[in-house]
């Protein structure tokens, strides 16, 4: 009898989930397994939205952001009584392996589920926040960064035409990764993230001197984690006499045509997950560090908070250091 394997998406969707679903169906069939989709994350596991999937289900989805099978944040799955129902639903269909595209909260839920039910799981880090300890890369980050880059490039056009400061707020929940990389790669004047901290008032002298030397617009990239975009805009107006606007990029960062890198990473993550199951892995998270994949335990992943790479932080600290003499 063929082994049955399912996949679900949990938490915030990312561009790259659909390429992962495509690879999942095609590679599972190639490895002589029967692939199943679970619709709407852990909610669908509880409500038995578990259906066999075929090639035709994944035809033409490579280019689409979001996820064809839906995602959800499930409160019910935190309760053991609902996890029991979920396990019964999988067992009733003979499914013994589950791939979860999501974040560390989802993986912790799966670890409990595995201990209680014996159903194997493999977690694939998928969040635009790039905030999972143990992996350098989470699926969806590259596409989100591309969208932010395009948005900031476009905002720069209007900022430079109108002599304004633009405060651009990126997502990231509590993590400044998206803001840091976007500020560096878009040539912003200011980057505010919790990992660096500091007081934007320290930039007053620097920016005032730049204005007197002819600067006629500013781009400030601020992580949503700072919760101070409006305050920064007011500061530009009051302290520097520079008209300011706030652009909260919001959910546009989560959608869009998956980048080449996210398509490729989706294929690689899923292939590694299926190969891992067939080699006997029962409960792991695939991490991608220093250009290599490795299986890690959930404890490895949640034992520490994610830390942005020191080299990147140093680069940003150096780049965004207030420097009154830079003109
Ligand atoms: O975790 C992904 C993320 O997009 C965060 O960057 C953001 O803070 C949050 O989800 C938004 O959540 P929601 O889609 O529920 O508004």
Image (cartoon, rainbow, N blue to C red):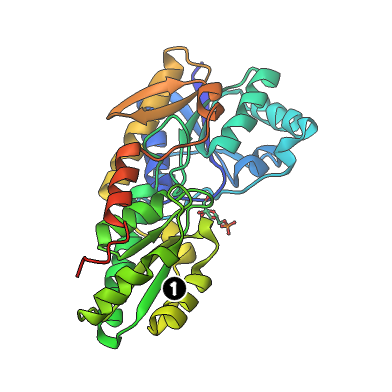
Please identify the residue farthest to the top as the structure is shown: 280
Look at the image and tell me in which quarter the C terminus lies.
bottom left
Q: Position of residue 110 (x, y in %)?
A: 61, 29
Please identify the residue farthest to the right as the structure is shown: 81
Quarter of the image holding residue 190? bottom left
Q: Position of residue 326 (x, y in %)?
A: 21, 66
Closest to the observer: 158 or 86? 158
Q: Position of residue 138 (x, y in %)?
A: 41, 40
The answer to whether residue 32 is seen in the rendering is no
Ligand 1 within 8 Å of disc 1? The answer is no
Task: Give left or right: position of 286 versus 75.
Answer: left
Quarter of the image holding residue 163? bottom left
Task: Give left or right: position of 144 versus 110.
Answer: left
Where ligand 1 lies, by image quadrant?
Answer: bottom right
Q: Residue at x 46, y 52 (%)?
A: 197
Callout 1: few (<14), some (14-19), or many (20+) C-alpha neighbours within 10 Å?
A: some
> Tag 1's secondary structure?
strand
Q: Is residue 305 above or below residue 116?
A: below
Task: Give left or right: position of 266 versus 160.
Answer: right
Q: Residue at x 52, y 55 (%)?
A: 225
Q: Residue at x 48, y 15 (%)?
A: 281
Q: Residue at x 34, y 61 (%)?
A: 147
Q: Is residue 283 above or below residue 262?
A: above
The answer to whether residue 239 is seen in the rendering is yes
| Residue tagged 1 | 247
Q: Position of residue 38 (x, y in %)?
A: 57, 40
Please identify the residue farthest to the bottom as the structure is shown: 162
Total numbered labels placed on residues in the image: 1
Closest to the observer: 176 or 152? 176
């Amino acid at each position: 009898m063929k082994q049955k394997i399912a996949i679900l998406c949990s938490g915030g969707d990312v561009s790259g989930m659909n390429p992962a679903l495509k690879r999942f169906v095609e590679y599972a069939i190639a490895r002589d397994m029967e692939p199943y989709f679970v619709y709407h994350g852990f909610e669908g596991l509880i409500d038995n939205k578990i259906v066999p999937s075929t090639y035709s289900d994944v035809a033409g989805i490579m280019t689409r952001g979001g996820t064809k099978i839906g995602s959800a944040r499930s409160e019910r799955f935190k309760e053991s009584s609902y996890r029991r129902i979920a396990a019964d639903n999988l067992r009733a269909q003979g499914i013994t392996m589950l791939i979860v595209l999501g974040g560390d909260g989802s993986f912790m839920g799966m670890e409990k589920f595995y201990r209680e039910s014996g159903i194997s799981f493999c977690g694939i880090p998928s969040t635009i926040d790039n905030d999972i300890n143990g992996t350098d890369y989470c699926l969806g980050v590259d596409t989100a960064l591309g969208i932010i880059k395009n948005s900031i490039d476009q905002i720069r056009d209007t900022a430079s035409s109108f002599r304004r400061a633009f405060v651009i707020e990126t997502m990231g929940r509590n993590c400044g990764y998206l803001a840091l990389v976007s500020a560096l790669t878009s040539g912003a004047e200011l980057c505010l993230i919790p990992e660096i901290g500091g007081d934007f008032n320290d930039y007053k002298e620097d920016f005032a001197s730049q204005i007197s030397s002819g600067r006629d617009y500013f781009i400030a990239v601020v992580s949503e984690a700072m919760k101070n975009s409006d305050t920064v805009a007011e500061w530009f107006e009051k302290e520097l006499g520079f008209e300011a606007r706030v652009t909260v990029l919001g959910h546009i960062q989560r959608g869009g045509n998956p980048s080449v890198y996210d398509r490729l990473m989706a294929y690689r993550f899923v292939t590694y997950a299926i190969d891992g199951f067939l080699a006997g892995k029962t409960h792991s998270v695939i991490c991608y560090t220093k250009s290599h994949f490795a299986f890690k335990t959930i404890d490895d992943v949640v034992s520490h908070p994610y830390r942005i790479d020191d080299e990147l932080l140093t680069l940003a600290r150096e780049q965004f250091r207030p420097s009154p003499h830079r003109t």
